[in-house]
Image (tube, helix red, strand yellow):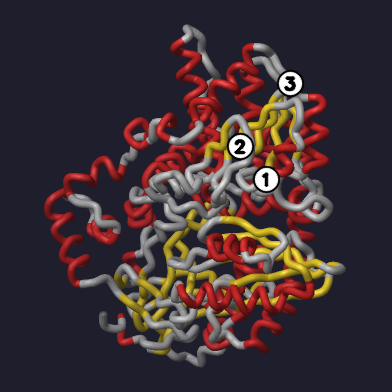
Amino acid sequence: MSDFLGISASLTGRRWLGPSIEVNRAGEALAQQTNLPPALCQVLARRGVTAQESASFLEPKLADLLPDPRGIKDMEPAAERFLQAVRAKQKIAVFADYDVDGGSSAALLITWLRGMGLAATLYVPDRIDEGYGPNAPAMAALAKDHDLILCVDCGTLSHEPIAAAKGADVIVLDHHLGGETLPSAVAVVNPNRQDESGELAHLCAASVVFLMLVEANRRLRDAGAQGPDLMALLDLVALATVADVAPLIGVNRALVRQGLRVMARRERPGVVALADVSRMDAMPNSYHLGFLLGPRVNAGGRIGQADLGARLLATDDPHEAAAMAARLDQLNTERRDIEASVRAAAMEQAEERGFDAPLVWAAGEGWHPGVVGIVASRLKETTNRPAIVIGLDGDEGKGSGRSISGVDLGASIQKLTAEGLLLKGGGHKMAAGLTVARDQLEPAMERLCELLAKQGAGDAGPADLKLDGMLMPQAATPELINDIDKAGPFGAGAPAPRFAFPEVEIRFAKRVGESHLKLTFGDTSGTRLDAIAFGAYDTALGTRLENHGGSRFHLAGRLEINSWGGRQSVQLRLEDAAEA
């Protein structure tokens, strides 16, 4: 594939790749056969959508894409035991992970049970004091006062803690990688169990919970009763799917699309309060879920009160929601400050080790466990390598890792745990958590390097920038963006289209915040477009464009509608540039 616009090394060191001849031809054929806008046809062609499939792809129906819940192992005993508890008005506890997926999963169950006239006990472990997942003391304590414990977004590897829940039944609703054996629960519903086909491996935990509620409602209908409105719960499923970076393909895409419509109705007090405190003044999209709402829900579990995010999403009291959203917003600001200092130290340490190995890693004394995952994500983005960041405290270190496409980090972490190099570890392909003894840190990271190298982790250079085509500034209109959005929502596994603007002039450029760049560019037609480049000064991009000296550049990024003060305009989210 030839370099797009002849760019083999951009200002961020990347090669630009355009669509293949086959994709271009397929896009042209689609436009002729469907009369859909050419830019939209180009996006559909890249996704492999045919003319016959285009109508159903552009209007995905949940009824067509939702799998039969009974196709997932243990779903039937899970739904049966759950309904048994509901009918008998037994005491139910929900043990949830402290992230958005866990919080959304818990809120789904609490809201559904409230609709049936029942209250559930919420338990979210403290990240620092208890760590991830069920622990024996908490499960034993819950079992004393409850008949049924539902572990959501956790529990698949929790043999001892679940065994400690004496006197109570336990159901696990999870999506993390399963081990060779399962804990002694009534049911372990998890599309990533080793004995599953893997067809639904892309579901997050909230989707697994939703499917159990679908099965529960079906059973109620068969018995002549009615369950709560499931469609009204899809805003929670959408939030979890995007925030947990689940790929927006198949049923996930339909769940998020429908969930965004539900969210736009502003009916859930917690989500409304969160949107307001985030100053979200546009129709919700996947960007808002991933970068405005998600981080705030997560902030409680990262550096504050672990159950705050789940409680916010589950509450039906607008006043309580407003207070909790304000607190989460404050915690999110504190989280950003903590993250910035850890990130600087981790980047410096990783640079000293070099970015050529299959794994980029850093470990530091007292680094907050609540931000190591975000910092690992930043390291991964910068280096196009799997990254691990570990906070050391006493004899142990707790860390988090993020992977790149095609490299299964969760499986490697699990292997390391089985080999005894980690005290604890688990996760899925793109993300994992671990606990390591301080004296085993170097050997563990060395072994992880070997395992990741076998998967090809060290072969990649800076990630190629894939472009969907070229545009002139005057072609970047709200109408074009609305046309393209029909192929959305965009996110993990379904990237938003990226366009290049060739040979443009920088008319205005200034630094905003610590590392962002705002600029205006145009061409000889007189048309001007605004652009924002987040983190531009973390690379050569910011300094060079700010000090452009009248030079012309090729700019590349994704188009979006910028809403400000009730007005809407087109903006380029600038990702890269090259000298023209």
Figure disc tally: 3
Q: Is residue 275 visible?
A: no
Which residue was labeled with disc 2?
Answer: 172
Q: Position of residue 195 (x, y in %)?
A: 45, 45
Describe residue 466's horizontal placement relative to residue 277 as left or right. Answer: left
From where the camera sits, is residue 8 visible? yes
Q: Which residue is labeled 3 in the image?
A: 91
Q: Earlier in the sequence, mark 3 or mark 1?
A: 3
The residue under the point 53% across, 47% down is 282
Q: Is residue 526 left or right of residue 51?
A: right
Image quadrant occupied by the N terminus: bottom left
As displayed, is residue 55 above or below residue 409?
A: above
Q: Secondary structure at mark 3?
A: loop
Residue wearing tag 1: 158
Q: Amino acid at mark 3?
A: Lys
Q: Nearer the viewer, mark 3 or mark 1?
A: 1
Question: SS of the residue at dot 2?
Answer: strand
Q: Is residue 212 left or right of residue 365?
A: left
Q: CA distance from mark 2 to mark 3?
A: 17 Å
Amino acid type, callout 1: Ser
* Residue 302 x/y as whole percent: 74, 55
Disc 1 element? loop
- Residues under labels 3 and 1: Cα distance? 22 Å
Q: Are marks 2 and 1 in contact (CB under 8 Å)?
A: yes
